[in-house]
Image (cartoon, rainbow, N blue to C red):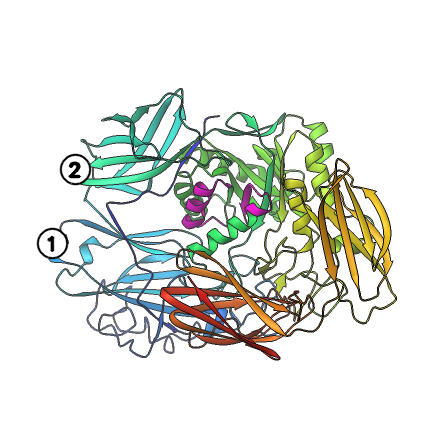
Amino acid sequence: MALLGLCSALYAQTVSLNGGWKFSLGNAASPQKDFGAGTEYFNYLTKARSIHNEGPYCEKFDDSSWQEVSLPHDWVTTLPYAPEASHSHGYKTVGWKYPETSVGWYRRRITFSPEQEGRHFALRFDGIFRNANVWFNGIWMGNEPSGYAVQSYDITPYIDFDGENIICVRADATLEEGWFYEGAGIYRNVWLEETSPVHPTPGGIWTEWADGKLSVHVEWAHGQAGEARFRLLDAAGNAVASSQEPVLTLSAPHLWDVEDPYLYTLETRIGEDVYRTPVGIRTAEFNARDGFLLNGRKLILKGVNLHQDHAGVGSGMPDELIEWRVRRMQELGVNAIRCSHNPASPALLDICDRLGVLIIDENRLMGINDHHKRELENMVRWGRQHPCVVLWSLGNEEWGLENDVRGIKIAREMREYVHGLDPTRQTTIANAGGATLIEGLEVHGYNYIIQNDVQGRHARHPEWPIFGSEETSGCGTRGIYFPEEGRMPAINRTHEYENVIERGWKFYHGNAWTGGVFWWTGLDYRGEPNPLQYPATISEFGLLDYCGFWKDEAWYIKAWWTEEPVLHVFPHWNLAGHEGETIDLWVYSNCDEVRLTVNGKSLGKKKMPADGHLSWKAAYKPGKVVAEGYKSGKRILREVVETTGPAVKLEASAQTIGTLAVVTVKVLDAKGRVVPDACLPVKLSVEGEGRILGAGNGDPAYLGPETPADGHNMEMPAFNGLLQVLVQKNGTDVRLRCSGERCPPVYFSIN
């Protein structure tokens, strides 16, 4: 099966509209309290543009008292928690119980020049959560109920080229769309796209690769471009193929791959407009014998499931943070991401195209009526352009359909509908354990071998392509080894029968007919903190915590998913209150053998089992644990874990992508060692041309604020010795000041 994808087309003029917005909460229960919106005699549904209207969508509305915000924006991050709030959404006070905080209004002014008249203009919203109404100059543009759909509105006829124009958005998060934290607001990018009247439709450029020919599909708006010309440029900008027809002949192309994500540029010229679209050429296929093939070679999918929220900013992640998270996954050896459980943002797809990470793009809600098909088409149209997308997931764990013949019918009709939009990729559904729905699938994704008899189904249906769409990581709270309220030790260490992360990897690694596995999850996410309740607000099964700090199991994955030598011993040795108790000391490593020494006493050397771990027992006493890793009889690694002194100082470092600095603050003892059980309150302030977007500590039971009231000053405890601060740079002179009890201030310059 020939497969090929394209990155999002770059229009003749595409301008970011992420800055300059005004925001205010509305009211979901009372139209009168909701700025009187829709209560006028001639409301916005009655007349296209009534001069008597007074709501926020009107040009004359006074928004001077509204808050200034930049996008992406998630207003739920500023809301408090409550034990009676939605468990699945992390106990944030949003939803039907809280009408005063479940509607948000946005307004933005925009101007055009008279010289632009005659051009075509569209507003594109990459995602608004949820049930969004959009107005332009008081005229209702439309409604999008889904919080995950890309929305594009033609505003050309409504523009005032001589005056000011008003964009207005109302988002209503009263109802949940998923059973996980979703935030609220314009949480993805917004764009103004300028083109000629005849132009490609949004999401309307895609290609197929077969027999040395690149076929370009272009769906035109407002007519047919009879004089379109096409060129394919290599990474250096050199033309390697050109044609006046949408077919380009290319011999021996440079293939896009996870190890070499090579991108060409497709240049489409229509009159004076030039559209440049990154292009990745590759083949991808799931089959029953080899599992998954990329460019004809077997590739084990080493994947994670990822939700779309992060500490400090919720679902309103800037593109740079999304990239930081993907790169964090790659450090573990991850080569694939399953979007759980909604379509990927255009930004994520662009980033994964560029970094070489495969994507399973997932539809939010199964069904075959017009609404369901429209949402399904939206996902496919915006995803089929991308080489990173290798599989369409039509749904996830639809228990009401999995053992019902109607499920087969729905799945088959959805599958054929997708193939009409994109005949190059296969489809799947993540199966929770049912036995009927899966008969209508092309590729069989199984959520947990403990719920699905994967081995038996393969024996009965050897023609079925199979992969593990979810498998439990068995993780718990970073740095927690004994139960606490709102926190839990890793299930891997407390499970009665077996290490569950090893069980999953050994199964999929040991059966060559599977395509690989996706862990639940790559990072912690807010919401469904099962099996815990309030005050736990975060799911704790990420390989990394909510900030992206590593848990112990991350080292297990890195050990067996990369070639880099790994040696990690745990727990830490600050176990006050457990003196004299017998402690299980574990080692994750890919060394041949490991020797462990506790407080000067050697516990011996053990051989590391394939895809496994090692363990020793020792009575806890403050001191030192030393692990030594051997390869071919030679010691290559040594890790020391010591009982530390009290916290006396702070240290800050940053990883910077674009204008975003991801700052890590560490709590240290007098010898410069991280204090792994320190929960020290830290005061944060930004000086200079920058602002704090938010902060996080990875603590699933933290109920305090995660954003600064003024954008510059806040306080948050470091949890188990670590704290993360997200700083937006608006210039070159930015400093972060950190201070804590018994710790002198630290000034960190962000370059």
| Mark 1 vs mark 2, CA separation in Å | 17 Å
- Of residue 729 and residue 253, the one placed in the foreground of this image is 729
Residue 289 image-quadrant placement: top right
Residue 507 sits inside the magenta stretch: no
Q: Residue at x 29, y 42 (%)?
A: 201
Residue 146 at x, y = what percent? Answer: 44, 55
- Of residue 282 and residue 631, the one placed in the foreground of this image is 631
Return the residue at label 1.
115
Residue 732 image-quadrant placement: bottom left
Amino acid beneath label 1: Glu
Q: Residue at x 50, y 50 (%)?
A: 342
Q: Is residue 453 visible?
A: no
Residue 563 at x, y = what percent? Answer: 63, 38
User: Seen in the image, is 231 located left or right of residue 674?
Assistant: left
Q: Are marks 1 and 2 in contact (CB under 8 Å)?
A: no
Disc 1 element? helix
Q: Residue at x 41, y 48 (%)?
A: 346
Q: Which mark is residue 684?
A: none
Return the residue at label 2.
271
Q: Tell me if mark 2 has few (under 14), some (14-19) or many (20+) residues whose alpha carbon lies within 10 angstroms of its own.
A: few
Residue 575 vertical placement versus 745 (above, below): above
Residue 127 at x, y = what percent? Answer: 41, 55
Q: Quadrant of the C terminus?
A: bottom left
Residue 336 sits inside the magenta stretch: yes
